[in-house]
Amino acid sequence: MRRSIFRISGVVLAAAAMLAMATTTATAASSSTSSTNLKSATLNGSGSTFQLGFNQVVIGAFKQQQKAVTINYQGVGSGQGRTDFANKVTDFGGTDAPYSAGTAPADPFLYFPTVVAPITISYNLDTVKSLRLSPETTAKIFSAQITKWNDPAIAADNPSAKLPDQAITVVHRSEGSGTTQNFTNWLVKAAGPAWTLGTGSTVQWPSSTQGAQGNPGVGSLIQETAGAIGYVDLSDAKALDLHFATVKNANGRFIAPTLGGATKALQGLPVNPDLTFDPINASGSRAYPITSPTWIMVYTNQSDAKKGAAIKGFLNFIYGTGSGQGQDLAATVDYAKLPSSLLTQAKAQVNKIVVPTT
């Protein structure tokens, strides 16, 4: 395994190796970031498991710099994260998809993009080390129209592969998930009539499929199940040493899920005034088509001065580009940093958070 990170759906703990790295890099960063020591505060957040690996590292590195601040983050899925945030159960939320119309909190809040990364189509086939998948074939696999690995449609995508006469086990998220929403959004956009299940944080999966909790849970189930296939963020797929397919993009090229491909998906992409954007099936010959955004959600008007200062400090750390700061830490856990134009907008938006003076 190339690296090791323990993922816990609860308070996040990074593995010793990553914490050691965070300690070293945070020390180096201390001279290039604000030396102001924040007052004691505890921030609780929940939501996206897609951003979980990145959060682990930046929370650990920020703690080394701001020892009075404790940040807890629960990976419960974007759907629950949006619900917790709207109900003010948490101080901030993590989501890979914005609120749908009519579901957003009544109080003003802000979306803060943090990183982007590919959603892989990961699989478990000992005899197939390289797999190509078109949107139409993927749609038929995940809707159980294709149930065997040697189906003619898969063979057409992979003319040189020796595909086994083996049953396919589809694995998906069991809870409301931004990864599900972005993956099915890609199928709606790219697969046309081959995909009939729609898009959302949950969909009505066929009864023959299997569900698992969080990106780590989906990845682990694929790893344990011969013939399985599912959608998993790149960070977890690499941590579990999974095989993943190259995917046909909007320009007709089969593209591997890489950070470079994710970055290409953002080139020239329009960004809304609230800093939401949609890189799914973006044009560009080198763009990876299932590139996911992710955001931290924060209320505009903070009621607690210490917490408000802490959340602003944490966001500024995430947007830092010096040695050991958030954007430079992204690639160490297989996330792509934000392009400079979006990063500039995100930094400016931190100043919109209103913190009481006492």
Image (spheres, rainbow, N blue to C red):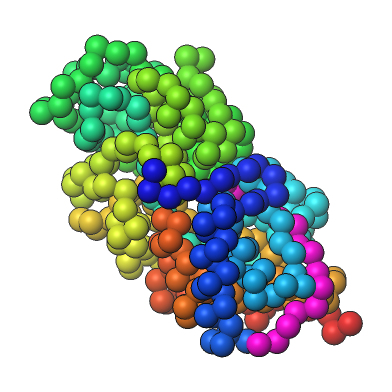
Residue found 51% across the figure and 65% down from its top: 21
x and y, in percent, of residue 106 in the image? 77, 58
Residue found 48% across the figure and 27% down from its top: 221
Q: From the viewer's side, name the closer residue of 18 and 282.
A: 18
Q: Is residue 209 visible?
A: yes
Q: From the viewer's side, name the closer residue of 325 and 266.
A: 325
Residue 158 shown left or right of residue 347 in the figure: left
In this rendering, the answer to whether 351 lies above or below 25 is below
x and y, in percent, of residue 354 in the image? 75, 78
- Which quarter of the rendered picture does the N terminus lie within? top left
In this rendering, the answer to whether 125 lies above or below 356 is above
- Determine the image quadrant of residue 286: bottom left
Q: Is residue 116 visible?
A: no
Residue 100 shown left or right of residue 303 in the figure: left
- Determine the image quadrant of residue 265: bottom left
Residue 289 shown left or right of residue 33 in the figure: left
Q: From the viewer's side, name the closer residue of 89 and 65.
A: 65
The segment highlighted magenta reads: 35-50
- Membership of 43 in magenta stretch: yes
x and y, in percent, of residue 176 in the image? 61, 37
x and y, in percent, of residue 227 in the image? 35, 20
In this rendering, the answer to whether 103 lies above or below 266 is above
Residue found 38% across the figure and 28% down from its top: 229
